[in-house]
Image: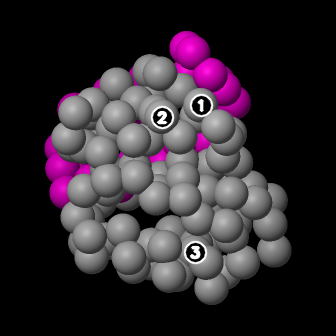
């Protein structure tokens, strides 16, 4: 199963890539919102994990793109340093499937991904 991870922070991107790959997933990475949306020109991931504040297009804009233009059923997880209730609620109202705050625990993300994708 392929997961698209979008985050402008290299350390977060490397950590997620490494942990998810070791868990058996194929990982594609994007460092900004435009790259994340461009990814859909050639592939459709099984799940997306992205930061809320990406350069060139925010996570909310990418989510809107995914939901309206491409594949409305793809699970989307947000990973953000913003833990405000208002922001979290907005993410869910816009169609996010999960919301985790930074700093994150990579093993927890793997468990959530496995659960959402029904993978053991």
* Residue matched to label 3: 20
Question: Sequence order check: which comes first, mark 2 or mark 3?
Answer: 3
Mark 1, residues whose alpha carbon is within 10 Å: few (<14), some, or many (≥20)?
few
Judging depth in this view, the residue of 106 and 56 nearest the camera is 56
Quarter of the figure that contains the C terminus = bottom right
Residue 98 falls inside the magenta stretch? no
Does residue 69 sit above or below 91 in this rendering?
above
Q: Magenta span covers which residues?
A: 67-94
Residue 23 in the image, given as x and y percentages of width and height: 66, 81
Q: CA distance from mark 2 to mark 3?
A: 22 Å
Does residue 104 sit above or below 115 in this rendering?
below
Quarter of the figure that contains the N terminus = bottom right
Residue 98 at least partly seen: no
Mark 2, residues whose alpha carbon is within 10 Å: few (<14), some, or many (≥20)?
few
Q: Residue at x 23, y 64 (%)?
A: 9
Q: Do residues under tags 1 and 3 come within 8 Å of each other at their CB atoms? A: no
Q: Residue furthest front?
A: 42
Q: Secondary structure at mark 2?
A: helix
């Amino acid at each position: 199963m392929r997961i698209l991870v979008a985050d402008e922070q290299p350390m977060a991107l490397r950590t997620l890539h490494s942990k998810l790959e070791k868990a058996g997933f194929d990982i594609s990475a994007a460092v900004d919102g435009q790259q994340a949306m461009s990814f859909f020109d050639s592939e459709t991931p099984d799940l997306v994990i992205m930061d809320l504040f990406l350069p060139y297009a925010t996570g909310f804009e990418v989510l809107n793109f995914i939901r309206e233009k491409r594949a409305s059923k793809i699970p989307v997880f947000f990973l953000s340093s913003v833990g405000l209730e208002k922001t979290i609620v907005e993410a869910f109202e816009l169609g996010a499937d999960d919301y985790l705050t930074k700093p994150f625990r990579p093993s927890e993300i793997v468990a959530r991904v496995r659960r959402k994708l029904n993978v053991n």
